[in-house]
Amino acid sequence: MIQIENNGSVFHLKAGGSSYVITVFAERYLIHGYWGEAIQHADPHQLLTLGARPYTVTEPLSAETATAFQKQWVSSGKVLTDRPQQEPELSYSPERLPLEYPVAGMGDLREAALRIRFADGSTTGALEYQKYELLDRTPGPEGLPYITDLPEESETLRIDMVDKVSGVNVSLYYLPINHLSIILRWARISNDSNEIMEIDQAASASMDLPRFEADMLSLNGSWAKERHFHRRPVSPGVQLVESRGGASSHQHSPFIALAERDVTEQWGTIRAVSILYSGNHRHLAEQDQYGAIRIQCGINPNGFRYKLSPGESFDTPAAALAFSNSGISGISDAYHGFVRTCLLPTQWRDRDRPILVNTWEAQYFDVNVENVIALAKEGKKIGGEVLVLDDGWFVNRSDDKRALGDWIPDPKKFPGGLLETVNRVRELGMEFGLWVEPEMVNPESKLFQRHPDWILSAPGRTPVMARNQLVLNLGKEEVVDYLLDVFSGIFSSAPISYVKWDMNRYMIETGSPEDPHRYMLGLYRLWSTLVQWFPTILFEGCAGGGGRFDFGSLAFMPQFWTSDQTDALERQGIQFGTSLLFPPETMGAHVSAVPNHQVGRITPAETRGLTALCFNFGYELDLLKESEADKATYSRLSALYKQYRPLFRTGRFIRLLPEQHHFSDLSSGRARHNSYAWAIISQNKKKAMVFFFQALADANDDGRWLKIVGLEEEASYRDIEKKTTFESAFLASRGLWIPPARGDYRSTYWILEKE
């Protein structure tokens, strides 16, 4: 909902239980006035304070304006000062204005949202408010991920700003999502001059918040250890997370949140930002010398520059802004609802996910029609629904050193081509899935020999190798057209129901600072076209595991391989952190073999299965080598998943255990927890599943209680296995009893139903 107030000078966006207010000051400046709990109306004179600061640029202020602002904040007498406050100050510093889209060169020395390099080499600009328009549609940034199928009453606010000297025009777009505390915003920068200019920096969103004691939350990690919670106090200066390798990265997810210092999982005020983009990003918080905080997100300006010719425009990725006054869980509720109702491809929003049986950790490159069928037979017995043929299926692909780019089924491994294998899998009552890595090429391949000019590289330099492969330049239209032709042919060659789309290295060098973004535009064209051509295929993203798990990918691919780490204990922490942004049905999670192939740990089949159960469940192990006892466990858990997957896909995911278990110890880099727990509660609160995991048994342990929040108040719930009944107030205040563990790596679960 969008309200235009105060004769068109106040823009009040209402989303869920939040308000976001923008106002115009001095008929020039666009002010970020308020972002917080829902309010009815906004007085523009209450949204900012004025006054001159020492050693800054100052501008004159009329007595009338000064008086209008002054009377909102001062009494008629002397308060905390000997200076009579009834004497208005007739100047102000632009530096203290809470700006909505700051530009370099206006007297504000904090991080600019926009920096443009003009033909004469200068980067000084000045944006002034021009006009606004309400749009009855949901225009998104061209060629970039955005939402689909919002309610008809949704409308978009466009605010136009202009630099009258340079001819730069900036249009800011805002879309409040009425049923969620989410606002989408993005910017279009247009060159209305007669000269070429270059964009050095263009943020998707920038907000100035008044001084408060804040913590910055982020999701950080590494390959096989992605998205662990980190929390640190905001201090003077800039603190940021970013990626530089052409993907959103394993190291720093495109997300930060500013939380009041006393925020917990279930209580307190928190504001979060995340861009809908899968490439280089930067999310920052800057605290100035007076304690005010600027929060900003967008394409990483490090290594970025984009030429804008006369008449051209540039669109930033959209940013999803979330607000919560119910702690960290409220941010998760908002983002989960956003993904489920607005972002995922429409055809997959209301469809349960199948149980996958993947060949990778079972057979690696040693795949052929017979051993694939043998695995499929065993997979069918334990409840598998889709057999996924991973890497190694195409000609000459015996290891990761060769053949990437030559997408022809190996006639030695699959003499009947893919079609024969697919048909035999389907005859078993399973569907067929296929692994591909279209964005990459090995130098030892026919594709590279034909088109060495198709790779991303720096002119005159030897290309840098990573995992024995190079990156195809998707910024070239002919490369994307070629890939569309090749993979539409493959996906049409047999009844394929699932595709795992992988990407196993970062960009190291590029020929131009425009290349990383143009690459993303090409990738999104490739994805959107294939998804449109093959709407019945379930696409799952992968990037060395979770290296490109972001809102941009989910706009095309309804699920993502959460991590290449398949050890149950490591996965618990990864999935716990990932759940801050993404609902469980978007996370690929498989039962793997023991000893685990990444860390060598041996964990019970039950714990491995329960760790993966409420996510996109599957198996990543050689079932022909598993014991009958373990296969019986897998069969039981597969049946449990099938029974409750509608709950997993639609229910509210809640992280349990005290907050000190949520965050890693930055001083040591190690997590401080021995257990994880989570619950999924149906939207009508009639049913819940609760999961608990403990890594190491404690000596002389006396057990513990696990509090369960989120159930219906003043209701009773029955444990359907033990046939015992609990009041919801008791479960929230005391909880479920967990007896001492006998042995390491233990797990359990409860199914609760409202009586």
Image (spheres, rainbow, N blue to C red):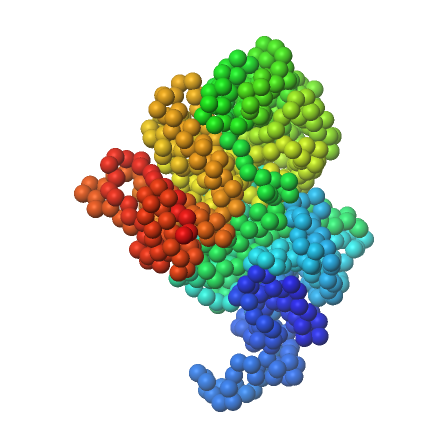
Which residue corresponds to the image point at 40% horizontal and 36% vertical from the top-left?
610
The reply to whether residue 511 is visible in this rendering is: no
Identity of the residue drawn at 53% across and 49% down: 336
**Observer-nearest of 421 and 711:** 711
Q: Is residue 229 left or right of residue 105?
A: left
Q: Quadrant of the N terminus?
A: bottom right
Residue occupying image coordinates x 46% and y 36%: 641
Which sits in the foreground, 718 or 384? 718
Residue 350 picture quarter: top right
Q: Which quadrant of the view contains residue 741?
A: top left
Image location (x, y in percent) of residue 34: 57, 67
The residue sitting at 60% across, 73% down in the picture is 41
Residue toward you, 9 or 628: 628
Image side of residue 1 versus residue 168, left or right:
left
Residue 619 x, y percent position in the rendering? 46, 28
Kindly tell me whether residue 387 is visible in this rendering: yes
Q: Eyeballing the image, is 477 above or below 325?
A: above
x, y percent for residue 261: 41, 61
